[in-house]
Image (tube, helix red, strand yellow):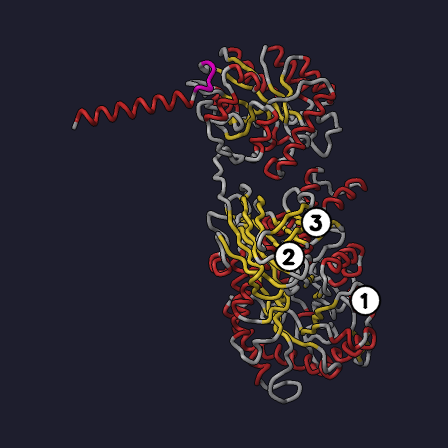
Amino acid sequence: MMRRSLLLLLVCICIGIQSYAQSTDHLLKPIPDKLVVLTFDDGVSTHATYVAPLLKKYGFGGSFYVCEFPPDFEDKHKYMTWEQIRGLHDLGFEVANHTGRHTHLDEVDEVGITRELEYIEDRCAQYGIPKPNTFAYPAYYTNPKAIPIMAKKGYTFARIGGGRPYDPRVDHPYFIPSYSTTGDDKLRVLEAIQQARDGKIVVLTVHGVPDYAHDWVTTPRDLFEAYLQYLRDNQYKVISLADLAEYIDPVAARKNIPATVPDPKGKPVVLPETVGINIDYGKTVGDMDPVYAWFGHDEPNYTYMKDGRKLLSGLADLSPVPVYVRTHNLLTTGDGSPALKWGSTNAYTEDEQGRPVYDWTIVDKIFDTYVERGMKPLVEIGFMPKALSSKPEPYRHDWAPGNPYGNIYTGWAYPPEDYTKWAELVYQWVRHAVDRYGKTEVESWYWEPWNEPNIGYWQGTTEEYLKLYDYTADAVKRALPTAIIGGPHSTGPSWDKAAEFLETFLQHCIDGKNYATGESGAPLDFVAFHAKGGPKFIEDHVQMNLGTQMRDVSRGFEIVASFPAWKNLPIVIGESDPEGCAACSMDVYPHNGYRNGTMYSSYTAAAFARKMALADHFGVNFKGAVTWAFEFEDQPWFHGFRDLATNGIDKPVLNVFRMFGMMSGRRAAVSGDLAYDFRTVRDSSVRGAKTDVNALATIGEHSAEIMVWNYHDDDRLGPAVPVNLNLSGLPDGKMQVQHYRVDATHSNAYTAWKKMGSPQYPNSRQVAELEAASGLELLENPKWEETQAGKLELNISIPRQGVSLLKLRW
């Protein structure tokens, strides 16, 4: 028995030795101790004026990774000319590829990767520089799609970050780790250099010496020369990355070593499995109602300003049905000057005798802007005019981001001193609207008194709000009996006090004593409540909370469904957003920076699909969800407001609404390998190891659509997910497939703006580029597919925070 065990152990050892030998046959010779590679990134000017001459002095090799770094590559104080780059080659240094415009490879697809590599290859050829055959990932962001592209193009080695030595026995040649020399921690760099032993190679990443473009990655000159002196004094061999081919066969290494894709810190990224999604167009679950075509904002005077008019035209164009717009402050007293969380119309004042004076000039200007575009108001009847307020002073607030939110609740938030005068104001407003726009038009509007009367927006009691509602509803119906009136637009009902307020209101409208008429109950044509999420910083990133918002939606639907008298009424989620304060900018609230990019757009796709699923679950009449986001006139570019556009340039989230506008007909059944259903999202949000890859599908008479998203609460980088779409129930024959995409590099003006260097005063050319980048883009050219027995298989890859729309036409 002992002899058998020893024999088995010997066999295992031999197999292990043989396996190790096989895994290292890509090593052409032993790796000597004290082997160091110097690499220099970004093509900065000091590489030519200081670094290269110093390397020649010491007799060292090095690799210079060049790109045309936007936005100021033409500033030759910061960056080398191409003649200087050619000079590096003439001096015997390696000139290598860092992409055309310092593009993060995780943000581009195969076409983009190829384009970026070939840009530098072509520029090198133009200046008589040999075609680069090594690569350095900008900012260390990798992409597994780059592997076959670099292999096909003959690239030998590629460098990442990671802060550790390169072990050619186990590290893939396209993911060679390196140490950065940035900063003034000399001991750290010297300790890193000393790791060049025992078969390991130290690769150093150096930026500018100094770096005039990005001072935060500077290596001080005195330290840089001290490092070179240390290397020479201690007899290190210093080479370029390409020179590693003397020791390592890169082709054999690629075969022997698995390509474990690292993140920017050098940690392995686990590549996701393919997600299978089945869409049965023969089984539908409900209509694709335009619940997305509702928007709102605090500041009504932005409506008719330059960028406000432009955005409203864009919103009107994206929807096949009229878009509804809700805004605060339609009755607030003031001169019409807008400010954050403030607006006014001066619709109601009183003369010296206390008689009403009605002036609809600004209100008409607002509603005219809607009606001219085929849009309709969700008329919020508020706030309290100064002449009617029971506590008129102080009246106008001076809130700014960072100030206590409660400071906004001034005289406009109080009940009227005289409810009869209030009712007459409402009556005159409705009559004026009918006279100006016609009975048929105004019959299609929604009217509702106040906003969030269960918190500080209403400085009265619950009973006083019910009284306000009764007087308001009676006045609206007297002016136009067929008008649509509803409420209460209370806050998210997952909060027990908000749920109690909503239930109290609904019961009052059934059998409560009407303060205006003395009868039982009050008119109610639709029900409205709000639903909000709650993002926050977790360690080093923003974490959203889609579940919090969905619990508000779920509880609100559940409450309405519990009232038989109201279960079939239309429900409008009067504010439906990832968080509460649209005017809270990211300079004061850094977690709100998510609003500029693809976190907001992917969240929006995932959220609307779950709202529809919850409505199906509770069997309620879900009419619309108001996205409380508009624009903030003349504010800094991409300032982190919750808005749909900045200075007239659409944000990525608006393109998801354009996608929704392209979907119509009936919603089809979706199933498959899905990590999150609506219950999981509601109860636990999207916090698991997997991302939320899911779909919403529709079918009409001659078209079908599929929206696919890849969302997670954690705003972190992650690999793209392969998705296998299996469609059934389609008509037989050929059909055209169009693939639209919102991600980091498509339909994304924010990325374009950052690549420009985030200019706060972009010139006319830059504005035109941003405009071009802001629309909804096709990911690829349309193609033709043919169904067999009503079935079709489509395969896509969707990046984290990406949203795709595939539109099929026949």
Q: Which residue is mark 1?
A: 368
Q: How many marks?
A: 3
Which span is picked out in magenta?
Answer: 25-29
Q: CA distance from mark 1 to mark 3?
A: 28 Å
| Label ID, residue 704 | 2
Q: Secondary structure at mark 2?
A: strand
Asked if residue 79 is among those painted magenta in the image, a careful observer would answer no
Q: Quadrant of the N terminus?
A: top left
Viewed as shown, does residue 495 lie left or right of 809? Answer: left
Q: Which residue is mark 3?
A: 776
Given the image, on which type of amino acid does mark 1 rest?
Asp
Q: CA distance from mark 2 to mark 3?
A: 18 Å
Residue 696: image location, x then y, percent = 58, 57
Label whose residue precedes the other's in the sequence (2 or 3): 2
Mark whose residue sits in front, 1 or 2? 2
Residue 295: image location, x then y, percent = 68, 62
Given the image, on which type of amino acid does mark 3 rest?
Leu
Q: Quadrant of the C terminus?
A: bottom right
Q: Is residue 431 above or below residue 110?
A: below
Camera-nearest residue between 618 and 181: 618
Residue drawn at 47 percent across, 35 percent down: 268
Q: CA distance from mark 1 to mark 2?
A: 36 Å
| Label ID, residue 136 | none
Label whose residue precedes the other's in the sequence (1 or 2): 1
Q: Give the prevailing secondary structure in the magenta stretch.
A: loop
